[in-house]
Image (cartoon, rainbow, N blue to C red):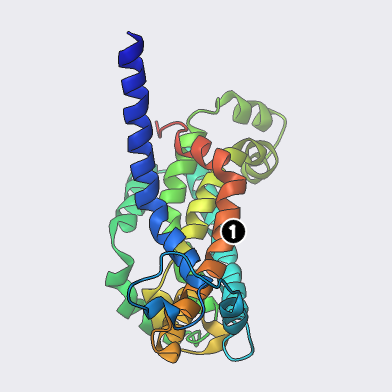
């Protein structure tokens, strides 16, 4: 029995290590490349670990010529604003569908989810035309508004599912005391929704942070509207595939995401495993 248990533990540990290596291997290699002196990443035979590690690559990408920190700030503004807008609109939509007696709420819910199935790349052209007519091209607003709409279906699904686990008696008691629907949502139910709001918020933030195609299309290459993925592409062109510098830019851009997930991971798991829409 003990032998079988140890075999099971070893196999589980081996499988875990393989998955971890598969998932974290590229990031580890980026980190190693980012501390290699520029140009040494092309050496043959290849150096696994740098002989003379250096932080000069980080100084280059954050210097006056490229300023990766400006792109990171733009991404933080876009992703943070899109996340807040998504949570507000999704929360109100989920409240209306799960806690009120509005007409056609199930049809509305499935219509929102159907919209979430459409890949964003399919609607880039009409989105570009709409943003151009609004005069938003080349601004952060051209990124924030579409990113909000991309995140609403999933966030609505998660929040509506969480609402299903909250007794309706809370709403009824508040209405007897004269509370309006808006007051019930913001003052009574919103504090209870913290786990799922963190979960939906993190997913919305990550989706916005990693967007490339839409950001590349509507930013028009302007530095003031350039987010991290677009900036790294421009670094690739400017550096002529100087991978040590590009790796340093990637590592700096990953830091905010790692911190976000590390801080809110327990809420992320709790929100994803909560309830279902009744």
Q: Going by the image, does 53 lie left or right of 220?
A: right
Residue 220 placement (x, y as % from top left): 44, 89
Q: Is residue 182 above or below residue 222?
A: above
The quarter of the picture where the C terminus appears is top left
- Residue bearing the label numbered 1: 84
Residue 234 placement (x, y as % from top left): 44, 86
Residue 183 lies in quadrant: top right
Crowding at dot 1, Cα within 10 Å, few <14 / some 14-19 / many 20+, comes out as some
Q: Going by the image, does 277 lie left or right of 225?
A: left
Q: Nearer the viewer, residue 207 or 136?
A: 207
Question: Residue sitting at 42 percent across and 53 percent down?
Answer: 24
Q: Nearer the viewer, residue 201 or 190?
A: 201
Question: Residue sitting at 48 percent across and 65 percent down?
Answer: 32
Tell me if residue 130 can be seen. Answer: no
Residue 239 placement (x, y as % from top left): 45, 88
Residue 266 placement (x, y as % from top left): 56, 38
Q: In the structure shown, which secondary structural element does the residue marked by tag 1 occupy?
A: helix
Question: Residue sitting at 40 percent across and 69 percent down?
Answer: 47
State the count of labels: 1
The quarter of the picture where the N terminus appears is top left
Tell me if residue 244 can be seen. Answer: yes
Q: Is residue 165 above or below residue 231?
A: above
């Amino acid at each position: 029995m003990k032998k079988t248990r140890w075999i099971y533990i070893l196999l589980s540990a081996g499988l875990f290590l393989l998955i971890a290596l598969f998932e974290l291997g590229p990031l580890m290699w980026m980190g190693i490349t980012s501390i290699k002196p520029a140009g040494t990443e092309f050496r043959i035979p290849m150096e696994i670990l740098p002989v003379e590690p250096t932080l000069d690559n980080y100084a280059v990408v954050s210097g006056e010529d490229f300023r990766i920190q400006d792109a990171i700030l733009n991404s933080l503004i876009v992703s943070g604003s899109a996340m807040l807008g998504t949570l507000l609109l999704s929360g109100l939509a989920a409240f209306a569908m799960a806690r009120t007696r509005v007409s056609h709420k199930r049809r509305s819910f499935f219509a929102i989810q159907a919209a979430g199935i459409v890949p964003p790349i399919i609607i880039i052209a009409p989105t570009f035309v709409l943003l151009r007519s609004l005069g938003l091209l080349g601004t952060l607003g051209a990124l924030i508004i579409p990113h909000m709409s991309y995140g609403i279906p999933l966030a609505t699904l998660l929040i509506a599912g969480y609402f299903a686990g909250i007794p309706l008696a809370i709403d009824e008691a508040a209405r007897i005391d004269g509370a309006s629907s808006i007051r019930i949502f913001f003052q009574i139910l919103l504090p209870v929704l913290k786990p799922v709001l963190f979960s939906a918020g993190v997913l919305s933030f990550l989706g916005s942070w990693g967007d490339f195609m839409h950001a590349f299309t509507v930013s028009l290459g302007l530095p003031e509207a350039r987010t991290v993925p677009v900036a790294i592409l421009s670094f690739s062109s400017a550096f002529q595939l100087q991978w040590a510098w590009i790796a340093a830019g990637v590592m700096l851009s990953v830091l905010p995401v790692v911190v976000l997930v590390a801080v809110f991971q327990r809420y992320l798991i709790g929100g994803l495993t909560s309830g279902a829409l009744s």
